[in-house]
Amino acid sequence: MAAKRETPTKATRKKPAAPRAAVKAPAAKRPASKPAVAKAPAAAAKPRKAASPARAAAKSKPVAAKAKPAARKPAVPRKKRVLPAALAPASLAPGLSEEERIEAAKYLPRDLPKRLFEEEQFLFPESYGVTRVRLLIKDPEWLFVHWDVDPKTLEALRSELGERVLALTRLTLRIADPDNGGSQTILLPPGSRSWYVRADAGRSRAYRSELGLTLPSGEFRSLAHSNTVVTPRVGPSPDGVAPRRRVFGSAPTPAGRAAQAAGEAKPASVPAAPVGLEPWKPQPEHTDAAERRADGRAEGPRAAPKTAGQTKGGASDAFTPPGASETHRR
Amino acid sequence: MPAGYWCPVLHAHLPYVRHPEYPEFLEEDWFFEAITETYVPLILVLDGLLADGVDYRLTMTLSPPVLSMLQDPLLVSRYHRYIDRLVELSRREIDRTAREDARFHDTARFYHHEFSRIRECFRGTYGSDLVRAFRKHRDAGKLEIITCGATHGFLPLMDGVPQAVRAQIQIAAQHYRKVLGRDPAGIWLPECGYMPGQERFLAEAGIRFSFIESHGITDAHPRPSHGTFAPILAPGGVAFFGRDTESSRQVWSSESGYPGDNDYREFYKDVGWELPLEYLADFMPADGMRKNVGLKYFRITGKVGLGDKQPYVRAWAMEKAASHAGDFLQRRQQQIREAAAGMSQPPLVMSPYDAELYGHWWYEGPEFLNFLFRKMHHDQDVVKTTTPSEHLDRHPELELAQPPMCTWGAKGYAEVWLNPGNDWIYPHLEIAAERMVELAHRYQQPNDRERRALNQAARELLLAQSSDWAFIMKTNTMVEYAIKRTRDHVARFDYLYRTLSGGFLEEPILQEFESRDNIFPDLDYRVYR
């Protein structure tokens, strides 16, 4: 089934419809004088009074620092003015850190009247026609899962099981730690496309999700496996591994050379030639799982081991060396 | 030899905003305001330091979008119009304040002088090419310029498509080489977003160092001995400098930090929202909307409503900037003396800031730096400024440790860029990235038009990946525009993908895309293989 796409003006099978704005006219042909921006509401455009009535002819005092204590006294009666809401800092989203509030100042103004942009007439597809599930790490406590189900998959199921069974079938997410065991199952509400999943905040763990269908009989039919992610450990590393030192290999940079020439930087041991920077891997961390294994204590149910053909999970996966799954874990 | 080093890092970045389809576009002002209030004022400070023989070190990111916009003829011509109008408005303001409100007259005169000086620097001194100015200070050995992700894509959330992460790094490094004529030694990971394993892409691009949030160092494994006072070496041979919390808070915090001082200029009170619209007609959008124009006449005053703010007095603000510079220096001296006691090498305090914080948000910020660099040079020997490259040359032995995933956003992870307000973009971005990889492998011998379409598809993907859009959606600033940009680039990518997958590519449409989204003209789509 075709994915839901934009509304083309003259779409044909062999001629994908260009986004509307691009089809309309090249920029050069467009009337340049009138940008397609919505009119501001009258209230917003209403001229405001000038900042303040003129004061007596008294000239401003010289702005020398010495004059400061005297000049600080507010001699000028103030006329209260209300700043337009568009500029008030309170219109920022709640819960932002100070830094984010400051950084947001780069993208002003805000709360403008509705504008009509010339923009692509494009509806984000509800499905790209593939069955997949992906995991992202939001923070040590939360994972974000998003998925797509090829409508053909559901059609096939409908043919096989019938409309009634399909209506009672639930899309299901299973989240598991492939190394240490443990899993959770989430019956997803109809129409959902993503979900936030609670992670084990106490320690770093690997997670992998499986998307499937739970039939009315309770049977689970797997549709797709996700990448594997490893949540970050919080807090200082508990392992008292003595830090190793090693020469950072590289010739001095131009800036460094300039500083050295000026007699400021006297590098004690800058190597004459670059030192090899072969990949280095940290020692495995002490893990709860390893401890449990060493103690002979029971572990939770283990997820099935990875098999060939499973989705590779990006750099996180690539970084975790096979057979050393505890590498970043705590 | 100093007891320790201070490594200031300014991260200059704005998203690529350029709208040739409109005669003027509100969001282009972000860039013009940054030139006027941050980039040129900083250059003027650096010029002064160089002329006066002040020895200083500063590290700056010039993100690829900022470098591209600084060299874009359309945006440069529009900036000329912007600064000309500003000079003219400030001239009119001298007359108006003399007539109507003497409280603001001195400040109006100050603005006119300042805007004229900025215009002269931009147009006269550097011939409308600020990259020249930054190069000059780099070549003088004072400024270290580093790169960033190609379009400031938030790399931890791209981890599912490693080729997309690699492309952000490779394209940035190539662009840096083209514009600045050297290989980048360092990189600012967008939003300080680090994911274990991604440093291999940095190493591949020849990058030696980057920066991470404090907990990236303190939570690293094994535990580094000196916290953020020394960089660590991560797998793959990339050094990471950790952000110093104390010096960051002193500047970043609007409550306890310097920028919140009562004598500094109030950011939220701009004449663009206060003077009659007919008076400002030449400076406002044609449709009756208002916007900031950059003339602000009030100081912070205290915890009072915006209507109760008092007039800005430049001399008081300058006095405060000098005083705060002295305080900052004293605290760094104390901090470094204390840290040095337990270390075998001089401690390093690395303080990263948004460049636009200096000048745009904290109007007196560039002058604070000016005072600070001069005081550090003339008044003491305890702390010296340095750059990461210099520090690594000087102290090449590092502790080996693996940082955890971290960012400099709220709570230290990805919440700002991944939350219910913006999470809907990631499935689309990820599919587009996967499709780009697919196209790069499928087209081994494209014809000219196909190659152009492939390169343009990569540009659209890169522009859609800019972390600014998710940030704006989260912070509730120009959300409508952020959604438009995401939609536009995903739509254009989608169109190109379909034409390259059996459809018919219309030349005028391709030209239109190339003309609008013209970043990285030398981009080669094969970077996605």
Image (spheres, helix red, strand yellow):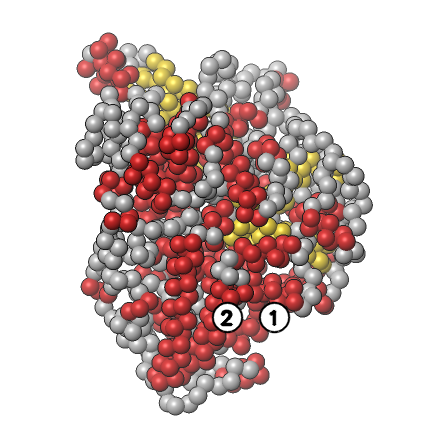
One can see residue A76 in this view: no
Residue found 31% across the figure and 65% down from its top: B284
Density class for disc 1 (Cα within 10 Å; few <14, some 14-19, many ≥20) is some
- Among the 4 quarters of the image, the one containing residue A122: top left
Could you classify mark 2 by the number of other residues whose Cα lies within 10 Å: few (under 14), some (14-19), or many (20 or more)?
A: some
Type of the residue with mark 1: Ser
Tell which tag, 2 or 1, sits nearer the viewer.
2
C-beta proximity under 8 Å, tags 2 and 1: no
Q: Residue at x 25, y 25 (%)?
A: A14
Q: Residue furthest bottom?
A: A57
Secondary structure of the residue carrying numbered label 1: helix
- Give the mark nearest the N terminus, 2 or 1: 2
Q: Nearer the viewer, residue A24 or B305?
A: A24
Question: Gap in Å between the C-alphas at discs 2 and 1?
Answer: 25 Å
Residue B493 visible to an observer of this rendering: yes
Q: Give the residue pinned by disc 1.
A: B323
Q: What is the number of callouts on the image?
A: 2
**Residue A117's x, y, as percent?**
26, 49
Tag 2 subunit: B
State left or right for residue B58 relative to residue B339.
left
Residue B448 x %, y %: 40, 31
Quadrant location of residue B10?
Answer: bottom right
Q: Is residue A153 left or right of residue B170?
A: left
Residue B112: % across, % down? 45, 74
- Please report the residue visible at 74 percent of the width from the left and 60 percent of the height from the top: B382
Q: Nearer the viewer, residue A313 or B121?
A: B121
Mark 2 highlights which residue? B117
Type of amino acid at the residue the image marks with label 2: Arg
Please identify the quadrant where the N terminus of chain B is shown. Answer: bottom right
Q: Which chain does the residue under circle 1 lie in?
A: B
